């Protein structure tokens, strides 16, 4: 099968992705093999390719926003059958026994494994996943529209839940890429007031088109105090202005697997009055199931740029240059 692998992590301008021919993957016990139709291109793939996220295995196939059809099932599979439409996300396995798994917080499992990091992902013709970690994808969603929901959407949704936004509350979004533009749609459709702070003029226009009340520069103060805020840009320097923008009792959330160093926070300006700063780690399967239901009931419409599979290296470089509004998706 054709697949893109991270050869040697290095700056994306030096093309760390290489197109190779690999043996077809085979599904083992409890696993299904998925023939890939579309795979989103996530900033985490960029972190892996450039080495910000240290590779766990040589020549890994990235991609963890995978949509396709089951084309083979391993021994013991009972949930899925050939022809079923499924999605494969970042979280691909947990121990199921630790206190985190038993309490519904499987995203914190110390033995969790991840698609496109611990095992090959969707920048390929085929990928394999435990059937209990595959999501059923509604037929009403096209493959390219469904793909970004499987990481950008799920992690953004978990960040929104962690933000404890009250009904009709004021939400700030810092950075406005694939995750943020989906969170904005959810929040607006649920009655929130959304203020966006981002460096990209095109992203600010998209935010307003999607119903944001205001859109300003990345570190600019919003026009009113915020009940909650989520930082999607991997820029630690934005944490202090985010925390200053919160009203009393507000919650600031950092969503992302990689963040540059956070400057010192002043107690009186950024933390006093019971403000909270939280992080997000991956997602649970429950988050994914809830998000996919919301995608249908709320009519979420991901903004995507579809790119051919053989343009994966160029697409990753364009992502690093903030060339896309919304999400970029590789389509086979």
Image (cartoon, rainbow, N blue to C red):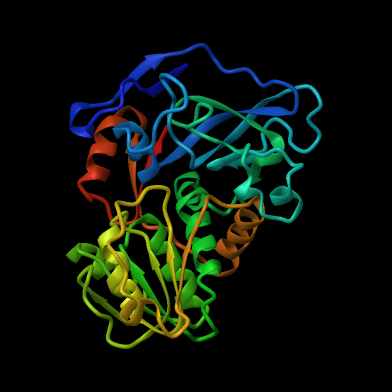
Residue 157 rendering spot, x and y as whole percentages: 52, 62
Is 176 left or right of 24, judged from the image as shown? Answer: left
Is 221 left or right of 61, judged from the image as shown? Answer: left
Q: How many marks?
A: 0
Q: Residue 93 occupies which quadrant of the picture?
A: top right
Residue situated in front as seen by the camera: 323 or 83: 323
Is 270 left or right of 293, judged from the image as shown? Answer: left
34 relative to 243, above or below = above
Residue situated in front as seen by the camera: 130 or 47: 47
Residue 7 rendering spot, x and y as whole percentages: 33, 20
Residue situated in front as seen by the camera: 95 or 128: 95
Q: Which residue is drawn at 74% across and 36% down?
A: 80
Q: Which residue is drawn at 45% across and 26% down?
A: 124
Q: Which residue is drawn at 48% across and 32% down?
A: 117
Q: Quadrant of the C terminus?
A: top left
Is 44 left or right of 110, judged from the image as shown? Answer: left
278 relative to 164, above or below = above
Residue 105 rendering spot, x and y as whole percentages: 66, 54
Residue situated in front as seen by the camera: 191 or 117: 117
Q: Which residue is drawn at 52% across and 48% down?
A: 150
1 relative to 148, above or below = above
Kindly tell me whether residue 325 is visible in this rendering.
yes
Residue 251 rendering spot, x and y as whole percentages: 46, 75
Kindly tell me whether residue 209 is visible in this rendering.
no
């Amino acid at each position: 099968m054709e697949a893109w692998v991270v050869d040697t992590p290095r700056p994306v301008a030096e093309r760390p992705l290489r197109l190779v021919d690999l043996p077809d993957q085979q599904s083992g016990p409890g696993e299904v093999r998925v023939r890939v139709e579309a795979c989103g291109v996530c900033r985490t793939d960029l972190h892996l390719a450039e080495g910000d996220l240290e590779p766990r295995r040589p020549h890994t196939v990235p991609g963890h926003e995978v949509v396709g059809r089951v084309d083979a099932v391993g021994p013991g599979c009972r949930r899925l059958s050939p022809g079923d439409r499924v999605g494969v996300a970042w979280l691909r396995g947990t121990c199921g026994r630790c206190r985190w798994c038993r309490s519904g917080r499987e995203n914190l499992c110390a033995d969790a494994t991840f698609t496109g990091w611990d095992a090959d992902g969707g920048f390929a013709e085929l990928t394999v996943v435990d059937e209990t970690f595959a999501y059923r994808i509604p037929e009403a969603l096209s493959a390219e529209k469904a793909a970004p929901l499987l990481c950008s959407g799920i992690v953004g949704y978990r960040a929104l839940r962690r933000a404890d936004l009250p009904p009709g509350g004021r939400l700030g979004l810092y950075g406005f890429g694939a995750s943020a533009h989906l969170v904005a749609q959810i929040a607006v459709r649920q009655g929130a007031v959304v203020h966006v702070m981002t460096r990209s003029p095109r992203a600010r226009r998209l935010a307003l088109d999607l119903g944001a009340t205001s859109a300003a520069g990345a570190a600019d103060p919003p026009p009113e105090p915020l009940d909650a805020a989520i930082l999607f840009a991997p820029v630690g320097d934005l944490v202090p202005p985010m925390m200053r923008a919160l009203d009393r009792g507000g919650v600031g959330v950092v969503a992302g697997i990689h963040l540059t160093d956070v400057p010192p926070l002043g107690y009186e300006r950024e933390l006093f009055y019971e403000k909270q700063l939280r992080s997000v780690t991956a997602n649970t399967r429950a988050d994914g199931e809830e998000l996919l239901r919301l995608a249908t009931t709320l009519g979420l419409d991901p903004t995507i740029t579809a790119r051919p599979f053989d343009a994966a290296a160029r697409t990753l470089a364009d992502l690093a240059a903030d060339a896309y509004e919304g999400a970029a998706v590789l389509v086979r």
